[in-house]
Image: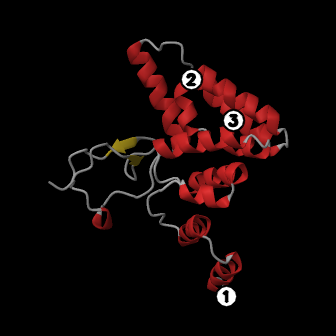
Amino acid sequence: MALTQIVNPIICPSCTIPRRFTAISPFKALNPQFSRHPTHALSRRLFLPSVSSIWDAITGGGDSNPREAFAATRRGMQLFRQGDVAGSVSEFDRAVVLDPRQKAYLWQRGLSLYYLDRFEEGAEQFRIDVAQNPNDTEESIWCFLCEARLHGVDVARKQFLEVGRDSRPVMREAYNLFKNGGDPEKVMRQFSNLGN
């Protein structure tokens, strides 16, 4: 039997009701080309803390604190932009302590670890992220970069993370370039000619 239905609801902004969200029925037939629903969805950055807070309210919350974890993540991103990469990792780690569920979404932590030459931890972070969202092209590439620094390009290519087909042509080409090798100048020429 083929999978022909969406098994998880998709939350997207409604054009008819301002500042509210509608959920697409989980039993709607899957046909993205002719969908009357917009293709943009609520970002994980906004969705996860909200859902985490609701879940905590229903279940009693445990020890997690998604609101504080979100704030720590924002501080970590700010510190990274300011050049305090070590400080950013501290904030990202604090976010994980406050809400362990956040670890699967902290690709920013992986970038900071890469720039601190902590490649093994960076690769692990990106692998966790791609396991949670198997369409993260950028995270797959960053994992490869971490592993190439650890084990060399050939070994890293053998364990390259497979992701879904990226809808962005530039990212598809970048993914294939890192995965299979090739001439980066050729890819750059190909995409720079599109703008002319």
Q: Earlier in the sequence, mark 3 or mark 1?
A: 3
Task: Residue under label 1, please give it.
Answer: 196
Task: Classify mark 3: helix, strand or loop.
Answer: helix
- The mark total stands at 3
Which quarter of the rendering shows the C terminus?
bottom right
**Which is in the foreground here, disc 3 or disc 2?**
2
Task: Residue under label 3, please give it.
Answer: 74
Task: Classify mark 1: helix, strand or loop.
Answer: loop
The location of residue 182, given as percent across then percent down, is: 63, 75
Task: Residue under label 2, please give it.
Answer: 99
Q: Earlier in the sequence, mark 2 or mark 1?
A: 2
The location of residue 90, given as percent across then percent down, is: 75, 28
**Label 3 amino acid?**
Arg
- Mark 2 and mark 1 in contact? Answer it, CB < 8 Å: no
Left or right: 52 as drawn, with respect to 181: left
Residue 56 is drawn in which quadrant?
Answer: top left
